[in-house]
Image (tube, grey):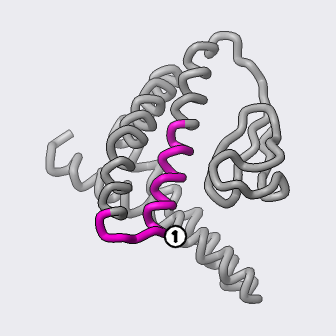
């Protein structure tokens, strides 16, 4: 693929991914505010944007074997947690933005857990261990198999977790 086309495709993927998430959040807000039809519209367009993002990923040939995808995901989480969030935390502390610092710190902690989960999966990919995951809806922490009484990252109770079986 031509380098300029590849760059444009990456930009399209990034834009579509951001739009899909933004619209999903807008749908949640519209539903919360009592606008079910607008919530549906935001959800439908979010889904459409996901389709665009998936097509871009396929054209970029970024979807590989499951084992390669797992290894790439582990490397990405490790890099983000170890480099990007450290820089974000430092910047937030320099300017005295406590909310941003807390957000970046919690996100870094959660990214480290993601990397650990990927590493464990890489080590056990052949045995295809089945587990239930529990995700904190406040900070994104992921628990493997056990629903914690309190989130170890942000401290909310177990009622704020969603299970994935």
Point out residue 136 in the picture as x, y percentages from the top left corner.
Answer: 70, 52
Quarter of the rendering containing residue 30: bottom right
Examine the residues drawn in magenta and state their main secondary structure: helix
Q: Which contiguous range is marked in magenta?
A: 94-112
**Residue depicted at x 68% and y 79%:** 39
Residue farthest along the top direction in this orientation:
126
Point out residue 124 in the picture as x, y percentages from the top left corner.
Answer: 63, 14
Above-or-below relation of 110 to 21: above
Above-or-below relation of 92 to 57: below
Residue farthest along the bottom direction in this orientation:
34
Q: Secondary structure at mark 1?
A: helix
Residue 80 in magenta stretch: no
Label 1 packing within 10 angstroms: few (<14), some (14-19), many (20+): few
Left or right of residue 35: residue 114:
left
**Residue depicted at x 75% and y 43%:** 134
Residue 109 in magenta stretch: yes
**Residue depicted at x 68% and y 45%:** 152
Point out residue 66 in the picture as x, y percentages from the top left corner.
Answer: 53, 24
Quarter of the rendering containing residue 28: bottom right
Point out residue 126 in the picture as x, y percentages from the top left corner.
Answer: 64, 11
**Residue depicted at x 79% and y 32%:** 145
Q: As rendered, which of 50 and 124 lies closer to the eye? A: 124
Quarter of the rendering containing residue 159: bottom right
**Which residue is identified by label 1?**
22
Picture quarter with the N terminus: top left
């Amino acid at each position: 693929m031509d380098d300029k086309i590849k760059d444009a495709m990456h930009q399209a993927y990034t834009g579509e991914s951001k739009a899909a998430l933004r619209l999903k959040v807008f749908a949640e807000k519209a539903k919360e505010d009592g606008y079910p039809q607008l919530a549906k519209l935001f959800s439908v367009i979010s889904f459409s944007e996901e389709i665009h993002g998936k097509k871009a990923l396929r054209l970029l040939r970024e979807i590989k074997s499951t084992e390669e995808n797992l290894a790439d995901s582990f490397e990405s989480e490790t890099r983000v947690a170890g480099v990007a969030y450290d820089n974000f935390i430092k910047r937030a502390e320099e300017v005295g933005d406590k909310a941003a610092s807390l957000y970046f710190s919690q996100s870094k902690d959660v990214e480290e857990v993601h990397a650990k989960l990927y590493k464990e999966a890489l080590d056990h990919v052949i045995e295809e261990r089945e587990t239930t995951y529990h995700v904190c809806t406040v900070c994104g922490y992921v628990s493997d198999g056990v629903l914690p009484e309190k989130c170890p990252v942000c401290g909310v109770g177990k009622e704020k977790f969603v299970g994935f079986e």
